[in-house]
Image: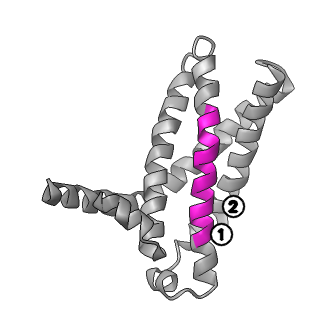
């Protein structure tokens, strides 16, 4: 319950905890999605279902990180106090990852809506998927330290409340 209060408390700390929680859910869903790629034909229904589950989670991640960006550049004291993300993430990784994520989810949604499993759209999706994966790995690796600190904090607080 304490963790929920932290997320709902607002401010930069609440935003940071919300972003970390959404990232954890996102990584879990992405792991399932990636596992379905190993045997796509028999797991196509699971792949499509998890892909559709990803859309609102990704939207929430975009919203939480976008809010942080707006508050930081708007001069919000708490957000400025936490400082900006690394320049490499702000200037290169985040914009490319956002655009490629939107294209990837749009391609997958179009394939599902058109009931296609092959053709030009399918190959375009596969190409975007490979490019997206390389950018995602960079983003996860660069953000793992902050995530590790938040997980450690929750683990310690969970032990204290038990």
- State yes or no: residue 56 in magenta: yes
Q: What colouring style does the render use?
A: one colour
How far from the left and from the top, in percent, is residue 17? 41, 63
Q: In the drawing, what numbered circle is on residue 91?
A: 1
Q: Nearer the viewer, residue 138 or 6?
A: 6
Left or right: 1 with respect to 109?
Answer: left
Q: Tell me the quadrant of the picture where the N terminus can be found.
A: bottom left
Describe the element under mark 1 as helix, strand or loop: helix
Q: Residue at x 43, y 54 (%)?
A: 21
Q: Is residue 34 above or below residue 89?
A: above
Give the alpha-carbon distance from disc 1 to disc 2, as whole Å.
Answer: 7 Å
Q: Is residue 2 above or below residue 97?
A: below
Quadrant of residue 111 within the rendered picture: top right
Q: Which residues are magenta?
A: 51-67
Q: Residue at x 27, y 58 (%)?
A: 154
Residue at which label 2 appears? 95
Task: Give yes or no for contact between labels 1 and 2 (Cβ–Cβ under 8 Å).
Answer: yes
Badge 2: residue crowd in 10 Å (few <14, some 14–19, many ≥20) = few
């Amino acid at each position: 319950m304490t963790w929920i209060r932290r997320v709902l408390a607002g401010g930069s700390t609440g935003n940071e905890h919300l972003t970390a929680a959404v990232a954890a859910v996102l990584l879990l869903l992405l792991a399932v999605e990636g596992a379905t790629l190993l045997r796509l034909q028999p797991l196509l229904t699971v792949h499509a279902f998890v892909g559709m589950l990803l859309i609102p989670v990704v939207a929430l991640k975009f919203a939480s990180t976008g809010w942080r960006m707006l508050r930081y550049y708007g001069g919000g004291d708490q957000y400025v106090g936490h400082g900006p993300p690394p320049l490499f993430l702000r200037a290169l990784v985040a914009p490319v990852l956002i655009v490629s994520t939107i294209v990837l989810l749009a391609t997958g949604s179009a394939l599902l809506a058109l009931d296609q499993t092959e053709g030009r759209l399918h190959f375009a999706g596969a190409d975007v998927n490979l490019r997206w994966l390389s950018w995602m790995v960079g983003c996860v690796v660069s953000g793992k330290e902050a995530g590790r600190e938040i997980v450690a904090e929750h683990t310690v607080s969970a032990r204290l409340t038990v």
